[in-house]
Image: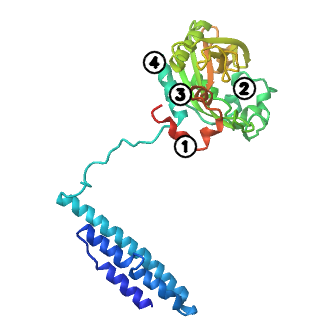
Amino acid sequence: MIDRIKSLEAEAAKWLADTAEEVEDFRIEFLSKKGKLNALFDQFKQVPKEEKREVGQALNALKVSLENRLEELKSGLSVAGSKKGDGPDVFLPVGLDGLGSLHPLTLVRRRITEIFARMGFSSEDGPEIETDWYNFTALNFAENHPAREMQDTFFVSKEARQQDDVLLRTHTSNVQVRLMEHKKPPLRSIMIGRVYRNEAISARAHCQFHQAEGLYVDKNVSFKDLKDTLYHFAKEMFGKDTKIRLRPSYFPFTEPSAEIDISCFICKGKGCNICKKTGWVEIGGSGMVDPNVLSSSGIDPEEYTGFAFGMGIERIAMLKYDINDIRLFFDNDVRFIGQFKGA
């Protein structure tokens, strides 16, 4: 039986085909229901029990070999046909119109960068693993601030001095401190990156997400400059009819501070499920840079003022594309990502 298998494999290897009919003859001869391979499988039932394992493996290998030989004959026929001019030209350049889709967070991130770049904001980046000093202390967080507790922050290591603790950054404001330390005003930059919070994962919250923060420090920077900047961003991001409002709030690193709301672009302020019937949706926080933060970074608060703002990219993407579950951004499901092609 083994000798017959080897003989059939050698016979198939010598088979040549110059036409589609000859390729089909090969398939009928070896791989059809009445072909030689099936005949061997029928005879396999009569093989002694002690030889079945060896013969069975040889038969399976033969089947693979014959199928590969059939594909080789088909491939050779395609190339020959293209050279003769009676088939497709396989040497033509491949079309590149079937590109994949960009992730919705990438689309939003690029749009944010583009809008602020037109307003003169440069892009800055910094480490995701940070010390307490840059993540909290230099940003005017008190030693007993709740954000320092383990339920909010992923700590990598705890040191003797609190400001030397190592952690996963909870916001991209650490980049603002580093920027102010190493560059002199005027400063006008945005910081976009991944941040981490020790939160339960749900449809509305995740332990990792992305932030876009902005910083402008110069002489005579006012709250009006902040409002005008946010107003322009909202119109460019969500549409020319978008309005903004700033609600008083509290952040350790800004004073005064304000939450940023935009008029609901779904219902145009009339009230819907997206805006919870209020006509407004929150997109982030903002305020004038606290003088203590400027001092910690080596900038004289008597000479310079500045504003800062921060927005969640996932939050903006969920509003812009009507997405109701933040977990979809991290599941890598092509059925979800694929729908944003060309968005």
Earlier sequence position, callout 3 versus callout 4? 4
Residue 183 visible somewhere in the drawing: no
Q: CA distance from mark 1 to mark 4?
A: 34 Å
Find numbered disc 4 in the image and state the secondary structure of the residue it sits on: helix
Disc 4 or disc 2, which is closer to the eye? 4
Q: Are marks 1 and 4 in contact (CB under 8 Å)?
A: no
Q: 29 or 237: nearer the eye?
A: 29
The type of residue carrying mark 1 is Arg
Q: CA distance from mark 4 to mark 2?
A: 33 Å
**Residue on which the image places disc 1:** 335
- Residue 137 numbered mark, or none: 2
Q: Position of residue 268 (x, y in %)?
A: 60, 15
**Mark 1 vs mark 2: in front:** 1
Give the residue type that dot 4 points to. Answer: Arg
Q: How is the image coloured?
A: rainbow
Residue appearing at x 79%, y 36% in the figure? 151
- Calculate the distance from the C-alpha at mark 1 to the C-alpha at mark 2: 43 Å
Point 67% across, 19% down: residue: 293
- Kind of residue indicated by mark 3: Glu
- Residue 130 quadrant: top right
Residue marked by disc 3: 124
CA gap, disc 3 and disc 4:
15 Å
Q: Amino acid type of disc 2?
A: Thr
- Residue nearest the observer in this picture, 6 or 306: 6
Furthest-right residue in this view:
144
